[in-house]
Every structure is written in C-alpha cells, then in structure tokens.
Image (tube, helix red, strand yellow):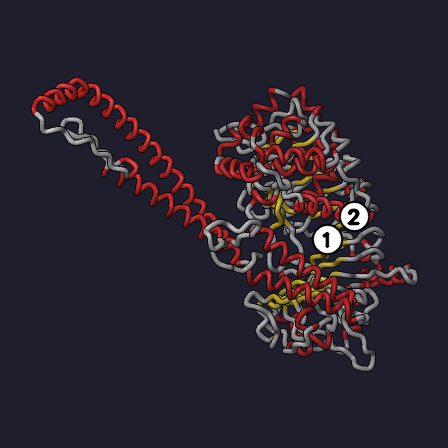
C-alpha cells in the first residue's frame, strides 16, 4: 500500500530532498524531529532569559541578551571627575531604570507568548504523530489482505490465459471473491476519505473540519443549520441532487424512516417500493432493487450487512450522518415529517405520509392524532409502523383512507423483540374502501384470528404479508378476488391448516410462501394450486401425516414457471412409525405410493386428472430446492439429478430430518448434480464424506455443513462454511 521505509528523507545538508515522497514512517520521524527541535528552542529561550540581567543600581550595566555581554567604560580615579561622573549617572539613573524595566517586561512578555505558541505547536505535532502512527498500523494491518488481493489477480490472470472451456465460470467465481475482498478493505477506510473530492490546496483543511463535525454527530439533529453548513453534508446533498434521478431519490429517502443504524432487509425495501409505485411489479423488481442498493453502496450512502454464510447481503445499514442529511431533504421534499430528534412523526398534513411511533405516555397518540385530523385521512398515502406496539384503529378511519397505497402495520425488524398486538380486527372491514392499496403488511401481529372478506375488495392489492401472524386460523374464502396479487406470505402462521380453494384463482401470483398440505377435504390441493401458471417461488408446509414425500414428484412438475421450492414437514410426520415405513420405501416407493393413493381415492383422482392435462414440455425447472425436517431415512425417487424438473438445479439445501444418505449416482447414466451450492444442516444421521460429495456434485463451489457429524473430511472452517472453487482449481484434494 505504501512504499518501504527509506530513512529520514533528508539530504546530507539537512535540507529536504526536493520532490521526494515520504513514507508514513518517515513522516512520523519528521514530526518527531520537528517536535524535538521546537522543544529545545523553547528550553533554550527559557535558559537565556534566566541568564539575562539588567543592573541599574550599581556602577555598571551588564546584559547577556542574545549572548553578547556589554561592559561600561571604567570610571576615572580622579575625585573631581568621579564626583562629576557620579552626578551625571545620578541624573540618568531614574531614566535608565525605568527604560530597563520597561524593556525587560516587554521582552519577558514576548518570550512568554513565544513559549505559549511553541507549546501549542508541540501538542499539535504530537497529535499528528499519533494520527500517523495509527495510519502506520492501518498500513501494517493491510499488508496481508493486499497480498491476498495480489494472489486473487494472479489466479484470474492464469485462468484468462489458460484458454480452457471452463475458464469463464472460474473467472466469474474468482471475480466475486476479489470483489468481496476489496469490499472488506474498503470498509476499513475512514468514512471521511470515502467522499473527499479531488486534489485541491484546501483539501486537508476541509477534511479536518469534516472530522471535527463528525465528532458532534449525536447533536446534529438539534442543529440543522450547522449540519447544512458542514462540508460533508454539502457533498452528500450534491451527490444526491446531481447523481440520482427522481426514482432513486425516493428510494434513498425511504431509508431515513428507520432508526439510526437499523438493519433493513432488501426484501422489505423491494415490497415498499412496489407499493409506492416507485417500481412496477413487472418481474424486474428484484433486479431493480439490487442494482439500486448497489448504487447506494458505491456512493457511500449505505453499507451492506455481510454475513459469512450468505453469498450476498440481505440487509443494509445507512450511515448516521447520511441519515441526518437526508432527513433535511425529506422535509424539503415532503417525504415524511420528522421531529427535532430526527424521528419520523404521525403528521401527514403536509407530506401525506405518516409513521406510527411508540407513545411515551399511557394513552396512545394514534387515537388523539387521527381523531383530530379525521377529515384529512383521505389524503394519506402511506402509513408505516416504525415502533408502535398497539396499532389499534377505528373502522371509520380505515374507510376514509381511500388514497393509501402502503399500509404497513406489522413488524419490519428481523428480530422478534418487538411485540405487536391488536385488540380488535373490526377495523379491517374498512380495507374495502382502500381501492388504491398495493402493499398490506400485518407481519408478526398477534390477536388476528380471521380476516374479513372485505379485504378482498382491495382490487389493486399486489403484496399481502401475513407472515408470523401466530393467531391466524383462516383466510378469507373469496381471496381469489385479488386478481392483481403477485405475492402472498402466510409462512409461520402455525394455526392455519386449511387453504381456500380460491387460491388457485390467483392468476397473477408469482410468490407464495406458506402453502399448507393438510388432510382437510375442502382444502386446496397442491395439484389444484398448479393452475397458477406464473408461480415462480413456492414454500410448502406438509402437516398431513399420510402425505408421502414421493407424491410430490407427481405434483411439482406441473408448476410450469416454478424456480424456487421449499418443502417443510410438520411435527406430525416425525414419528417413529414414519421412520420404520421408510426402510421399505427405497426400492418399492412407487408401489407404496399407489397403495396410499388407494386409501385416499380423492387424492389419486385429482393427481391422475392433473397428469392427463399436463402438456409435454411444460415442466418446472427448479434452480433452488430446500428440504426441512424430511421424515424418511432414504430420499424420494424424484430427488435425483435425472429428474426432469431438477436437471437445472443450482442450489440444494437440506436442513433437519432423518435422512441417512443422499441419492446414489448410477455410473451407467453418468448423470450428476449440477448444483453449485450445497447446504447440509442438523442431519445427525446423514452419512457421507468429501470424496462422495465431490463425485456427486462435480460443479460444487460452496459447501455449508453444520452439525452433521457423519459427513466426514469436508474442508470446512469452524463455522462449517467453505468456498470450494479455489481448492478445486488449485488441485487440492481432501
């Protein structure tokens, strides 16, 4: 990072070498040298001052100022002359005494002033030395990371020059590694260096001022004028105004709503931006969101929250000073209202957007505020719950919110620390009047057992988030009326055990989380759900103990657009009997399934009908498959690389359950898994080793193994995670 230390950097004459660049270590030596010289100068001045004296009361005056003694001429021995001389001296005695005292006092004052300046300068130099010593430590700490970067580049160069058919895949993987390593180093760079402008003579002074203001950040929200005048804030606002279009400005301003240093999920932002109509739900929402967040990271507005077991960040955090600056812009552009402490408020009269915040007093401020401004509720466009625990509303309030597009009443945090509860669900009847509602979230709210059918009159509703509503027991019967619904999340609703048949009428649905397979006769079956031709992501919870894993192989291929599939088995299936049945299932699974279908004639008829309607070529192509709590000891027959709907699989996650072995690869077929990412967690009975995994997954790039004691000899670190591509590329075998 820095050139090696080459000494003092001075020529033999003691003068600096013109044009010579100094290392950090040389700068530290220079500063120490200057400090020592100034300290000596201060000491010498003090000593000389002590040696200087003025004798005005004797026969002579001797001074040693500047080291040059001055002696008065000798007095003649003649008495008359002596007397005359004495009289002459007496005449000037008082005058010389006064003048000497005045000169001495002036000199002493000047000396004290110089000493004071020298002390200040010595302190400044000492501070500079400490700062550069920290920078030197920064240099030393980065030596090894930069060696790693150099090795990354060398590896990429080798792959590019090799000309092998597979070089492009390896290069892309290595580029990701290099990018991650660079990001880790960039994070260590002090924040003021991120936004420093190009070279100028005043650049150093601007950085110093910015650093001083950064120390005052906790009080910036109380002094808006001071913040506006800061160089750092001006630079942020300049980037905001000149580098972002209107759409990206709104996206960035939405970050300021969340508390300082809050981790905000990418998924939440995407849903919100779709609800605000900032981005249309046209299938490119995720791409736009990722590109937007990447832009914000590059511009140093936000930082990613990286986790070791995640290949890409899922959450982001905004820098506090950026948030303070954006709060000013949000007020100017009427994107939420903020108080003097930088917290969003419920005041929507000017901006038409309001936040629910926790009340400090006993009585909730919701009732007071909305009752006072009840006639203005028709102007409200966004209502977001930031910290309120009891978001209780009146039905008539909801009925008047005819323009609202985003209604986020649930929990946005990743943790479950904040308990949210409603006393009554009567207010939800007012949802029928929200004709412009696009995004509704009730995530994590307790006390909701049912939702009224009036919800289904919100014709423009695109995203319905009911995740973790633990008291929810049933969905509205006419939920199929939500013809524009693209996302439905009912995962972690553990009391919800019956699916309305109208779910199969949600023709625009692309993401469905929490579909339940139960033994209710009137519930929507998985085969019926396959009528959703646009469904791309599906998570299933199987609580029917008679539903065998092998049956999934008949239903899943019918989902023509399905790309991501998650299947979880409930506790009812994890019985000892289920484990015993699985021992005989491996070789005669299809026959066992047929016997089971004979016991459940309706299931067999539904599946047979579906298979008859299936057209050749319209088969799902799963790229990500996740299995949780698999109840059998042997894998189902469809869990194999030869399965038509798994031949494009890129990610395979297996978490928990009784699985003893992975699907065997038949040598004659030479069909192997194409998966690049394999995660194995909490599989105490799974028995395999690194050699077998390499044979089964020849394209494997990442492996995670957590609490799988019988999965042996894998090159994983202490956290169970490893990146395999460099190991395979370098020919390292375990």
**Above-or-below relation of 453 to 471:** above
Residue at the far left in the pictured view: 79
Q: Position of residue 324 (x, y in %)?
A: 57, 34
Q: Is residue 455 visible?
A: no
Residue at 60% from the left image edge and 59% from the top image edge: 308
Residue at 65% from the left image edge and 21% from the top image edge: 374
Question: Secondary structure under badge 2?
Answer: helix
Q: Nearer the viewer, residue 487 or 554?
A: 487
Q: Quadrant of the C terminus?
A: bottom right
Quarter holding residue 591? bottom right
Quarter holding residue 397? top right
Q: Are marks 2 and 1 in contact (CB under 8 Å)?
A: yes
Label 2 environment density (alpha carbons within 10 Å; few <14, some 14–19, many ≥20): many
Residue at 88% from the left image edge and 62% from the top image edge: 611
**Above-or-below relation of 260 to 307:** above
| Whole-number angstrom distance, CA of label 2 to CA of label 1 | 10 Å
Question: Secondary structure under badge 1?
Answer: strand
Mark drawn on residue 515: 1
Q: Left or right: 208 with respect to 644?
A: left
Q: Nearer the viewer, residue 18 or 627?
A: 18
Q: Position of residue 17 (x, y in %)?
A: 53, 51
Q: Position of residue 12 (x, y in %)?
A: 47, 55
Q: Left or right: 423 with respect to 402?
A: left
Q: Quadrant of the N terminus?
A: bottom right
Residue at the far bottom in the pictured view: 668
Q: Is residue 480 visible?
A: yes
Mark drawn on residue 503: 2
Q: Left or right: 694 with respect to 307?
A: right
Q: Left or right: 367 with respect to 78?
A: right
Residue at the far top in the pictured view: 91
Q: Nearer the viewer, residue 546 or 25?
A: 25
């Amino acid at each position: 990072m820095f050139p090696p230390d080459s000494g003092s950097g001075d020529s033999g004459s003691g003068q600096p070498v013109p044009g010579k660049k100094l290392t950090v270590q040389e700068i530290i030596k220079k500063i120490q040298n200057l400090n020592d010289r100034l300290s000596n100068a201060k000491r010498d001045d003090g000593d000389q001052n002590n040696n200087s004296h003025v004798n005005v009361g004797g026969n002579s005056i001797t001074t040693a100022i500047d080291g040059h003694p001055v002696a008065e001429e000798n007095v003649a021995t003649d008495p008359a002359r002596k007397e005359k001389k004495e009289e002459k001296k007496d005449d000037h005695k008082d005058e010389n005494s006064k003048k000497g005292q005045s000169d001495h006092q002036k000199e002493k004052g000047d000396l004290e002033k110089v000493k004071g300046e020298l002390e200040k300068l010595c302190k400044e130099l000492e501070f500079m030395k400490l700062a550069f010593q920290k920078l030197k430590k920064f240099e030393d700490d980065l030596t090894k990371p930069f060696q790693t970067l150099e090795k990354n580049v060398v590896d990429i160069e080798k792959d590019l020059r090799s000309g092998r058919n597979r070089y492009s895949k390896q290069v892309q993987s290595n580029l990701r590694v290099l990018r991650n390593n660079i990001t880790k180093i960039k994070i260590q760079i002090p924040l003021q260096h991120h936004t420093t402008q190009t070279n100028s003579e005043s650049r150093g002074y601007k950085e110093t001022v910015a650093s001083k203001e950064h120390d005052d950040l906790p009080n910036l929200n109380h002094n808006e004028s001071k913040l506006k005048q800061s160089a750092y804030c001006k630079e942020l606002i300049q980037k905001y105004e000149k580098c972002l279009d209107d759409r990206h400005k709104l996206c960035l301003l939405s970050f300021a709503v969340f508390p300082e240093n809050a981790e905000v999920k990418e998924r939440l932002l995407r849903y919100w931006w779709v609800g605000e109509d900032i981005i249309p739900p046209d299938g490119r929402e995720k791409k736009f969101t990722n590109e937007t967040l990447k832009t914000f990271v590059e511009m140093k507005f936000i930082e990613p929250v990286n986790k070791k077991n995640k290949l890409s960040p899922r959450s982001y955090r905004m820098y506090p000073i950026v948030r303070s600056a954006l709060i000013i812009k949000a007020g100017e552009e009427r994107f939420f209202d903020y108080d003097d402490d930088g917290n969003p408020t419920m005041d929507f009269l000017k901006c038409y957007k309001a936040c629910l915040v926790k009340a400090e007093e006993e009585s909730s401020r919701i009732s007071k505020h909305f009752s006072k401004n009840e006639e203005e509720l028709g102007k409200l466009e966004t209502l977001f719950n930031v910290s309120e625990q009891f978001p209780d509303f009146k039905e008539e309030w909801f009925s008047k919110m005819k323009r609202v597009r985003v209604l986020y009443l649930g929990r946005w945090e990743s943790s479950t620390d904040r308990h949210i509860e409603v006393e009554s669900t009567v207010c939800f009847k007012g949802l029928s009047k929200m004709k412009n509602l696009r995004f509704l979230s009730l995530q994590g709210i307790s006390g909701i057992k049912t939702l009224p059918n009036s919800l289904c009159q919100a014709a423009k509703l695109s995203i319905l988030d009911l995740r973790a509503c633990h008291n929810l027991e049933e969905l509205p019967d006419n939920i199929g009326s939500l013809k524009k619904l693209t996302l439905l999340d009912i995962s972690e609703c553990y009391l919800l055990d019956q699916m309305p048949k109208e779910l199969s009428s949600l023709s625009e649905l692309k993401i469905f989380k929490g579909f339940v397979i139960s033994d209710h006769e009137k519930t929507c079956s998985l085969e019926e759900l396959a009528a959703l031709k646009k469904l791309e992501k599906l998570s299933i919870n199987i609580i029917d103990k008679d539903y065998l894993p092998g049956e999934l192989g008949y239903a899943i291929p019918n989902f023509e657009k399905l790309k991501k599939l998650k299947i979880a088995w409930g506790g009812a299936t994890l019985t000892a009997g289920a484990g015993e049945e699985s021992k005989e299932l491996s070789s005669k699974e299809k026959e066992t399934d047929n016997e089971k279908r004979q016991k459940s004639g309706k299931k067999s008829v539904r599946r047979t009908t579906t298979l008859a309607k299936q057209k050749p070529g319209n088969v799902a192509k799963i790229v990500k498959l996740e299995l949780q709590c698999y109840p059998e000891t042997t894998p189902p027959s469809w869990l194999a690389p030869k399965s038509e709907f798994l031949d494009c699989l890129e990610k395979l996650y297996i978490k928990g359950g009784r699985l003893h072995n992975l699907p065997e690869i038949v040598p004659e077929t030479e069909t192997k898994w194409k998966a690049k990412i394999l995660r194995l967690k909490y599989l105490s009975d799974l028995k395999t080793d690194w050699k077998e995994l390499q044979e089964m997954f020849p394209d494997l790039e990442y492996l995670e193994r957590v609490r799988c004691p019988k999965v042996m000899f894998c090159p994983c670190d202490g956290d169970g995670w490893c990146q395999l591509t460099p190991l395979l590329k370098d020919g390292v075998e375990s």
